[in-house]
């Protein structure tokens, strides 16, 4: 039994964490990520293993790499290995698809809760710190790190590894990463703890790791500079394994694909594991014969920006195959539906997307099923989101997505999303929507969750919480939404607050009104400039 680790049921004090501000589903075992295929990424994983075991080495390891090079897959495998050895303390897998998992302010509180659940000594120090004031989770990152992470780890003397994946997917407006600056301040004070961090070398992240305090305690590994032959070998192994599994499901796939086809696939991957994964997903689409799918893929021309040529060609082929027979007037619906997957603050189900956009639910499900090789898609009632972050990057970039039938203009479609949210609130909000007793507190209503489910649709809930988020990202004819906003403020404002109250999201009203004021000031300034 490992000292300092709780092997008993969590005590009543853990109930304190139930309402503690944190991100849900951020741990490594949640979400869409899978680990590395056995026999691949050996050199990289072995190097990380040596670093994790040797506490005489630097306390931070930055695995950086371009999009599609397999950072999250490696991070998942590292976390799994650390768990197997009893050395993983906590993990946070950032994701721009989820509001709470792209919020820097939730990383330290979420890690602290995991550490408290795992280590008794950590918990005994943390609980007295937060019990008097759970608003610690709302304090600046520096204070969070000190009180929630550094102090309990230092005083408990715990030795462990913490994994933070895809840090670049968090929203950070500072020139140099805020969280990396804080880590540089506090990591040297907890020498028995190591931080394994992955992320693209975005300017904000790169500048953060160049900060003097952090640079001196950081090992870095550049994933896209690995020997090409080694990467190609791993990609080929992945293709062979995937096609072998596919041959068990489809008859007549013996001796398939040919060596020439396999070599061409590896060539087109250009070192990007995301290309290999997306290609297999496309080829194994159970609606089509794999041989025919592979032929379509290999017959497609390389298009788009040079850096992403083959990947862009793959994405273009999938979209064109899915919608080539559509009428010209149908493509606005295609773009609106795909934008709801890509631009939503949190993943939505096809049925919720249909209600938000005013479309037929069956039509939305069918449309998304046609491109399920680009998505994590189950059915009409489960959330859907992009298979990989490179797809939103592609479809929102006109220099990469050259077919304007599919290219999404985020500003235009955020404005459309805003209008739809306001429309839904206009029709769906009413006074005392849950028929609650007069003067009753939410905590006094025993069946509050049931009433919410029966009276507030997920689409209406989304509209109430995120209309302002889309508004601030809207572009084009922003003045056209002014009338809808005025109606909302005059007729729906109080009922909107009621809904936020029963949802436990009243804090969001402050952020919404602040965003609205800033947006109105900007619009007024832009209109004034255009007149003068």
Image (cartoon, helix red, strand yellow):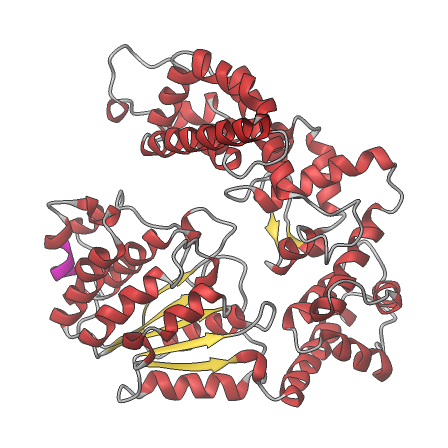
Horizontal relation, residue 323 to residue 334: left or right: right
Residue 62: x and y in percent read 42, 76
Please indicate, yes or no, whether residue 194 appears anywhere in the rendered image: no
Q: Measuring 48% from the left and 56% from the top, which residue is drawn there?
A: 95
Q: Nearer the viewer, residue 381 or 501?
A: 501
- At a point 49% along the width and 74% down the height, the residue shown is 64
Q: Is residue 502 above or below residue 124?
A: above
Assign the magenta stretch its main secondary structure: helix
Residue 238 relative to residue 170: left or right:
right
In front of the other: 373 or 223: 223
Residue in the foreground of this view, choosing between 242 and 472: 472
Q: What residue appears at the point 88 percent right and 36 percent down from the top-left corner?
A: 327
* The quarter of the displayed image where residue 252 is located: bottom right
442 drawn magenta: no
In the displayed orientation, state which residue is furthest to the front: 532
- Whether residue 386 is visible to the viewer of this picture, yes or no, is yes
The magenta region covers 123-127
| Residue sitting at x 48%, y 37% | 469
- The quadrant of the image that shows the N terminus is bottom left
- Please tell me whether residue 335 is drawn above or below residue 374 in the rendered image: above
- Find residue 153 and report its horizontal and vertical position in percent: 18, 69
């Amino acid at each position: 039994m490992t000292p300092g680790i709780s092997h008993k049921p969590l005590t009543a004090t853990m109930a304190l964490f139930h309402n503690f501000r944190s991100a849900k589903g951020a741990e490594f075992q949640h979400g869409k990520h899978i680990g590395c295929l056995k026999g691949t990424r050996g050199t990289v994983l072995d190097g990380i293993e040596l670093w994790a075991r040797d506490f005489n080495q630097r306390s931070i390891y930055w695995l950086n790499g371009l999009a599609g090079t397999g950072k999250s897959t490696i991070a998942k495998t590292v976390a799994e290995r650390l768990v197997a050895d009893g050395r993983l303390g906590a993990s946070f897998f950032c994701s721009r698809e989820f509001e709470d998992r792209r919020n820097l302010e939730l990383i330290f509180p979420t890690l602290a809760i995991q550490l408290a659940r795992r280590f008794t000594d950590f918990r005994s120090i943390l609980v007295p710190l937060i019990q008097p004031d759970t608003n610690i989770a709302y304090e600046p990152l520096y204070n969070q790190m000190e009180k929630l992470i550094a102090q309990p780890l230092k005083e408990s003397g715990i030795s462990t590894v913490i994994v933070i994946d895809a840090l670049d997917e968090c929203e950070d407006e500072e020139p140099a990463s805020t969280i990396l600056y804080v880590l540089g301040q506090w990591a040297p004070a907890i020498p028995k703890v190591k931080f394994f961090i992955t992320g693209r070398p975005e300017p904000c992240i790169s500048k953060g790791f160049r900060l003097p305090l952090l640079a001196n305690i950081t090992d870095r590994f550049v994933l896209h500079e690995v020997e090409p032959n080694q990467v190609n070998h791993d990609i080929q192994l992945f293709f062979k394994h995937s096609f072998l599994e596919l041959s068990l499901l489809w008859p007549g796939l013996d001796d398939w694909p040919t060596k020439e086809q396999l070599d061409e696939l590896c060539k087109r991957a250009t070192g990007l594991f995301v290309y290999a994964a997306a290609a297999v997903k496309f080829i194994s689409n159970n609606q089509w014969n794999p041989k025919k799918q592979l032929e379509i893929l290999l017959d497609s021309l390389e298009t788009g920006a040079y850096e992403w040529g083959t990947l862009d060609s793959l994405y273009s082929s999938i979209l064109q195959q899915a919608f080539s027979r559509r009428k010209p007037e149908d493509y606005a619906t295609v773009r609106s539906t795909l934008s709801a997957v890509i631009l939503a603050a949190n993943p939505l189900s096809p049925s919720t997307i249909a209600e938000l956009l005013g479309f037929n639910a069956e039509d939305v499900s069918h449309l998304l099923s046609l491109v399920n090789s680009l998505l994590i898609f189950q059915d009409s009632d489960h959330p859907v989101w992009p298979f990989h972050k490179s797809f939103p990057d592609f479809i929102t970039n006109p220099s990469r997505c050259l077919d304007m039938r599919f290219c999404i203009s985020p500003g235009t479609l955020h404005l459309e999303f805003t209008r739809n949210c306001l429309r839904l609130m206009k029709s769906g909000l009413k006074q005392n929507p849950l028929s609650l007793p007069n003067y009753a507190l939410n905590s006094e209503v025993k069946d509050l969750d049931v009433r919410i489910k029966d009276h507030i649709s997920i689409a209406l809930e989304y509209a109430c919480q995120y209309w302002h988020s889309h508004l601030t990202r809207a572009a084009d004819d922003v003045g056209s939404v002014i009338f809808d906003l005025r109606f909302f403020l005059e007729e729906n404002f109080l009922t909107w607050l009621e809904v936020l109250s029963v949802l436990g999201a009243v804090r969001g009203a402050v952020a919404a009104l602040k965003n609205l004021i800033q947006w109105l000031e900007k619009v007024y300034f832009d209109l004034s400039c255009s007149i003068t």
